Image: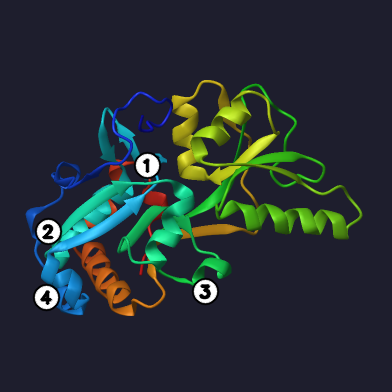
Amino acid sequence: MARSLFGWNIAGAVMALVSPWNVATTPAYAQAVVPEARAALPESVRQSGVLKVAGGMVWAPFNWIDHGRITGMEIDLITLLSRKLGVRPQISDIKFATLIPSIRNRRFDVALGQLGITPKREKVLRYVPNFRTDYALLVRKGTTDVDINNLCGRKLAATVGSGQLPVIQSISDACVQSGRKPVGIDVYGDPLNTYLALSNGRGDGYMVAKGPGIYITRRNPKLALSPGILRGQEMRSGFVVSRDRPDLQRALSLALDSARRDGSYLAILKKYALQDGAIAD
């Protein structure tokens, strides 16, 4: 069975579809083909007329499955950018752990899922940044004694391959260097299982981007956000393509620049109450 955000109740393990309905409210002019961006596309993509996109559809409000339909901010945005490039987005739901390998071997052209920009990932990927945010901490509802800026000796739940892992590890290293206990980490295979573990009392918290954290607490009555944000850390994320495809990165960047100028990028973020995370250029 396929994944929905808070249950396993949608048939079909992998979905590949076009999602034009999500950007129906953007102005018609915002969807016009941008000649410079289309010209930058790899010839293979331009000739096929299809942009193959993959994501693990469990990360609302960026990408998730709602009543059998793939939706979310990044789904809307990649659909819009595809129209500006004059191609059709073919969007697939795959396991989070397979995203980066599937980009590197060119099974897919673009990956999404609020993929945080990290030095390790930048060695093998190229980013098209589309969002910035602070880190917050999900905790079980009623928890009042966990401080995101005082995590030494705590145990956090985390998702395998996530951008939060190196952040947590750096905090833990600093704890050890100062003579305090390290931060323990329990790693789970995908965000759904990480939410479930925390809800069931495994771990003191789950570090997340603030926007998704707010959304999750509205849908899961067992979880809440602890006060405050992680000081001195900001998460930037975006679409990713293989390191050896600078032409595709450039095409997507030019299309996104067009969306910034015509207001459609900000309109999509506002639809999901994510406008505070807009990147200016």
The residues tagged by marks 1 and 3 sit, at their Cα atoms, a distance apart of: 25 Å
Q: Answer few, some or many: residues within 10 Å of disc 1's Cα (few below 14, many 20 plus, some between 14 and 19).
A: many
Position in image of residue 35 (x %, y %): 11, 75
Q: Earlier in the sequence, mark 4 or mark 3?
A: 4
Residue 234's image quarter? bottom right
Q: Earlier in the sequence, mark 1 or mark 4?
A: 4
Disc 4 designates what residue? 35
Q: Amino acid at mark 2?
A: Gln
In this view, the residue in front, 269 or 5, is: 5
The residues tagged by marks 4 and 3 sit, at their Cα atoms, a distance apart of: 30 Å
Lateral position of residue 226 relative to residue 65, left or right: right
Look at the numbered discs 4 and 3 and tell me whether their residues touch, using CB distance below 8 Å: no
Disc 3 designates what residue? 123
- Tell me what residue is drawn at x 49 percent, y 34 percent: 192
Q: Amino acid at mark 3?
A: Lys
The residues tagged by marks 4 and 2 sit, at their Cα atoms, a distance apart of: 12 Å
Secondary element at tag 4:
helix
Q: Is residue 273 above or below residue 240?
A: above
Disc 1 designates what residue? 57
Q: Amino acid at mark 1?
A: Met
Position in image of residue 258 (x %, y %): 21, 68
The colour scheme of the drawn protein is: rainbow
Disc 2 designates what residue? 31
Q: Quadrant of the N terminus?
A: top left
Secondary element at tag 2:
helix
Q: Amino acid at mark 4?
A: Pro
Q: Answer few, some or many: residues within 10 Å of disc 3's Cα (few below 14, many 20 plus, some between 14 and 19).
A: few
Q: Earlier in the sequence, mark 2 or mark 1?
A: 2
